[in-house]
């Protein structure tokens, strides 16, 4: 199943000590990288190499390495999460690169995502947006039987499409306006498609959009870059639904 | 020391209700005077933090991640069990209880497991109310799938992303409480120690991973929901940051560690393919619903799978276990895969893999149905291996996945240190020697949404609600010790990287304390671990400083703890001279090479107490069974 070959690469990696420091690209060479490696395993190899020569390893966020936690992400040759469609950086494998390639690796950039160090960025603004209304106000205990509320399979599936967001921030990094519309639309759309979300749908759309604006994210101008970069393939149709939800709420009021 | 599990008296089905009734309550006006520290924000931590805040307590929740939504619960794929009996196939609370206790090979407490089965139904209701998009039937009802170790269909799911959706549900409730000001969320904090004052847990010492600052946090109770220790093996299905540090430091402060040798080896993972490999990826066990497991009948058959005719394939699980077939529990599936590969019938370049074949299911149900059920899993598999399971059978092999062992807790989920509660995978309570599929999500959420909110009051009602002062000697000396250990790590200026030591430890544990164990191998490991540890402190290299974001330092602290903890695991494995649950003790097997349990001598929970440099002290909590008959597990 695995075609084991090796490649040699030149890396230009963004190095920045902390959020206040200036950053710059540093160049490294890597030899004999197995094409079965994941992109993050390639960075592991780089870091082991740097450590053994007394250099500071490259800081990068990562955790599950299964494409679901949303922790990893970097811009590779101008594309968030690299060249493969619907693939997070940890699921990108080196078989998609050729020997001799130069890879420019940079953090996700946006006003609302401060660089913490090297490729690590602060995405807590996403949590702030969810706190503004990305929930159903229901306390534990006292919920009715799960089957008391039938939900059509079609709606459940569409809600699941929207809910698949892993909160990685690639949509923001890909957008020329650094908009977080795809992220916000995922949650608003999921809860608009499900009856549980209906009692609070107006406040949710208004508050989440306002918080997004306040945090310094840009607006949507239909570039569709977010959809192309999304590792979960979330469609911009959800942005259309967000716009409808927002407009309805703004027009019909509280 | 006597470990009192505080199991309520009375009939099994009434224990929990009676216990809730007889526990002391904290009145609503007083709840706001208590502060509770929750460490970890996975299913157990997030659900506990949110629910305790809903009740009116002040909660401070700390996580190692940049956001609570990253916790490794998110990676659970297959589903969550509940005894709803929506399928009308004979399920009940008692059956879920029985399956779970039998699946755990009769090494868990009856009362805890029964409560878990009772609460399973409330969890589904709660999650539906939160807007978790569970899979639905055409009529709008909740859909179920089957899972290993059960003959009923009781697993609720959201495609192959059930853990993600349940975690995001708990995260949404948590976010709501953050907005309401009842939860203070503190991301990127790593717990370095537990503060014990006058015998009670009063707070924690953490490192702010961004600034490097060491912080003290005081509270009237400390809730640990810090997950499992599978990464002791280096290669596991756990996320990279999963570690034992918080639990292990609590152990060093006096909390007993129970059953550390109970480690689950999951049968369906993508096989190892190179020494650069950083982790193993699990393929949900739900795949065994439709996939058939086989190996070539001939040893050393190197033909590609599609060229091996039907008559030359050995569907060994279907042959050996006709009533459960491919749906035998995880331990049985793992052990049999190892047995086939040990006989030289393994697939692939390394010979350490078996096939999981969907051809028949695709023929029966059509491609569209199979893609709808497993599409994202197939995609994940193809990304990693460059092979499409719709056309070529998957290759799978067992890998370390879940740890049933954890800090010892009583029925209230409180450890033997008053005020220290432990939830989710971090405790040992419900899965015995083997966890059934789709039961981890159930336990994490039962602990957080329903158990801790009812039991913590019983403790807090007996505590003063005066603010906890973090300026005391016990806080400050604990803080200094934590600072001292970080400085010691930063002083390491040797020639080997931390990862290199971690890999060496992991391989040693996998070889001697993995699926099959033998006294000789365990003794070898016990001799070798202190040597590796010695070399770590002599020759490891840690770069950077303590006053910045420093991932090498974080890793070094975790590996240093694994190097001590590994010894505890091996001690525990060595004393348990029986095969049970996930592990086969080679000296203890039947003539047919099935695991042989020894109820007469080992029907107890082993709980270890830290003794400094001396060997830890073993306490035994006897397990008694009044409602189930201890049978030898048979899935034939």
Image (cartoon, coloured by chain):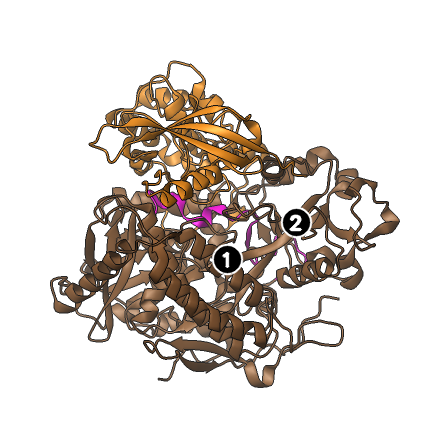
Residue found 86% across the figure and 45% down from its top: B309
Q: Is residue A223 above or below residue A35?
A: above
Chain A: drawing colour: orange
Q: Chain of mark 1?
A: B
Q: Does the residue at mark 1 contact the one at mark 2 (Cβ under 8 Å)?
A: no
Q: Secondary structure at mark 2?
A: strand
Residue found 34% across the figure and 48% down from its top: B552
Q: Which residues are magenta?
A: B64-91
Image quarter in which the C terminus of chain B is found: bottom right
Q: Chain of mark 2?
A: B
* Rendered location of residue B363, percent (x, y): 79, 38
Circle 2 residues within 10 Å: few <14, some 14–19, many ≥20 = many
Which residue bears the numbered disc 2?
Answer: B396
The answer to if B627 sits in the magenta stretch is no
Instruction: Return the residue nearer the eye: B507 or B535.
Output: B535
Chain B: drawing colour: brown
- Whether residue B164 is visible to the viewer of this picture, yes or no, is yes
Image quarter in which the N terminus of chain B is found: bottom left
Instruction: Return the residue nearer the eye: A100 or B46.
Output: A100
Instruction: Return the residue nearer the eye: B559 or B266.
Output: B559
Q: Secondary structure at mark 1?
A: helix
């Amino acid at each position: 199943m695995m075609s084991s070959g090796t490649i040699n690469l030149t890396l230009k990696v963004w190095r920045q000590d902390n959020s206040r420091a200036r950053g710059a690209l540093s160049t490294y060479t890597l030899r004999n990288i197995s094409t079965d490696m994941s992109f993050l395993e390639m960075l592991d190899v780089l870091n082991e190499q740097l450590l053994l020569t007394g250099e500071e390893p490259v800081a990068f966020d990562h955790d599950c390495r299964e494409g679901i936690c949303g922790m990893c992400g970097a811009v590779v040759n101008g594309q968030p999460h690299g060249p493969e469609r619907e693939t997070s950086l940890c699921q990108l494998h080196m078989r998609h690169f050729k020997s001799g390639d130069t890879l420019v690796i940079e953090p996700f950039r946006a006003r609302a995502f401060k660089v913490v160090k090297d490729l690590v960025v602060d995405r807590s603004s996403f949590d702030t947006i969810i706190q503004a209304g990305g929930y159903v106000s229901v306390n534990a205990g006292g919920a009715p039987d799960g089957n008391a509320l039938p939900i059509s399979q079609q709606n459940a599936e569409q809600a699941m499409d929207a809910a698949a967001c892993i909160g990685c921030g690639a949509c923001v990094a890909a957008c020329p306006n650094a908009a977080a519309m795809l992220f916000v639309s995922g949650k608003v759309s999921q809860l608009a498609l499900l009856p549980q979300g209906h009692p609070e749908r107006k406040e949710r759309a208004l508050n989440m959009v306002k918080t997004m604006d306040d945090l310094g994210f840009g607006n949507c101008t239909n570039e569709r870059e977010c959809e192309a970069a999304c590792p979960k393939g979330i469609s911009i149709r959800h942005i259309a639904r967000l716009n409808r939800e927002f407009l309805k709420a703004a027009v019909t009021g509280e | 020391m006597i470990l009192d599990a505080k199991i309520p008296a009375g009939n099994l089905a009434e224990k929990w209700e009676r216990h809730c009734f007889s526990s002391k309550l904290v009145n609503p006006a007083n709840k706001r005077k208590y502060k509770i520290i929750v460490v970890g924000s996975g299913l157990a931590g997030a659900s506990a933090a949110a629910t305790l805040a809903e009740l009116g307590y002040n909660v401070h929740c700390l996580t190692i991640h940049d956001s609570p939504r990253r916790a490794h619960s998110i990676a659970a794929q297959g589903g969550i069990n509940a005894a709803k009996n929506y399928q009308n196939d004979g399920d009940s609370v008692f059956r879920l209880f029985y399956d779970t206790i039998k699946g755990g090979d009769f090494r868990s407490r009856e009362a805890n497991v029964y409560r878990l089965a009772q609460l399973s139904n409330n969890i589904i209701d709660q999650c539906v109310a939160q807007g978790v998009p569970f899979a639905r039937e055409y009529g709008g009802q909740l859909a179920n799938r089957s899972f290993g170790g059960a003959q009923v269909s009781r697993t609720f799911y959201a495609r192959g992303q059930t853990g993600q959706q349940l975690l995001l549900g708990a995260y949404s409730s948590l976010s709501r409480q953050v907005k309401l000001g009842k939860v203070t969320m503190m991301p990127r904090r790593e717990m370095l120690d537990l503060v014990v004052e006058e015998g009670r847990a009063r707070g924690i010492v953490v490192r702010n991973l961004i600034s490097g600052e060491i912080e003290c946090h005081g509270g009237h109770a400390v809730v640990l929901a810090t997950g499992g220790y599978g990464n002791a093996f280096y290669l596991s299905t756990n996320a990279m940051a999963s570690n034992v540090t918080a639990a292990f430091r609590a152990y060093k402060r006096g909390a007993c560690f129970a059953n550390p040798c109970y480690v689950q080896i999951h049968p369906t993972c993508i096989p190892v393919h190179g020494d650069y490999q950083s982790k193993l990826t699990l393929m949900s066990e739900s795949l065994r619903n439709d996939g058939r497991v086989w190996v070539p009948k001939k040893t050393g058959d190197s033909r590609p799978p599609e060229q091996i005719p039907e008559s030359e394939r050995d569907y060994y699980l279907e042959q050996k276990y006709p009533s459960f077939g491919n749906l035998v529990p995880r331990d049985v599936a793992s052990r049999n895969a190892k047995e086939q590969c040990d006989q030289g019938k393994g697939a692939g370049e390394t010979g350490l893999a078996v096939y999981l074949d969907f051809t028949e299911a695709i023929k029966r149900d059509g491609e569209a149905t199979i893609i709808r059920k497993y599409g994202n899993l197939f995609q994940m598999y193809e990304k990693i291996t460059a092979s499409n399971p719709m056309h070529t059978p998957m290759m799978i092999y067992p890998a370390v996945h879940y740890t049933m062992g954890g800090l010892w807790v009583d029925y209230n989920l409180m450890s033997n240190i008053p005020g220290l509660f432990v939830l989710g995978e971090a405790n040992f309570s419900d899965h015995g020697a083997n966890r059934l599929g789709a039961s981890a999500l159930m336990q994490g959420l039962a602990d957080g949404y329903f158990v801790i909110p009812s039991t913590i009051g019983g403790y807090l009602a007996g505590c003063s609600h005066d603010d906890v002062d973090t300026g005391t000697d016990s806080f400050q000396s604990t803080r200094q010790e934590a600072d001292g250990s970080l400085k010691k790590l930063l002083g390491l200026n040797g020639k080997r990287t931390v990862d290199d030591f971690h890999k060496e430890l992991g391989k040693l544990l996998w070889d001697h304390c993995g699926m099959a164990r033998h006294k000789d191998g365990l003794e070898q490991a016990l001799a070798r671990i202190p040597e590796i540890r010695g070399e770590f402190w002599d020759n490891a290299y840690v770069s950077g400083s303590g006053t910045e974001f420093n991932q090498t330092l974080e890793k070094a602290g975790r590996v240093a703890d694994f190097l001590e903890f590994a010894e505890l695991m091996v001690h525990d494995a060595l004393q348990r001279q029986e095969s049970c649950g996930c592990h086969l003790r080679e000296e203890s097997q039947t003539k047919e090479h099935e695991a042989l349990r020894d109820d007469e001598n080992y029907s107890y929970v082993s709980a270890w107490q830290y003794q400094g440099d001396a060997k830890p002290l073993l306490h035994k909590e006897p397990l008694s069974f009044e409602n189930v008959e201890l049978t030898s597990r048979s899935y034939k």
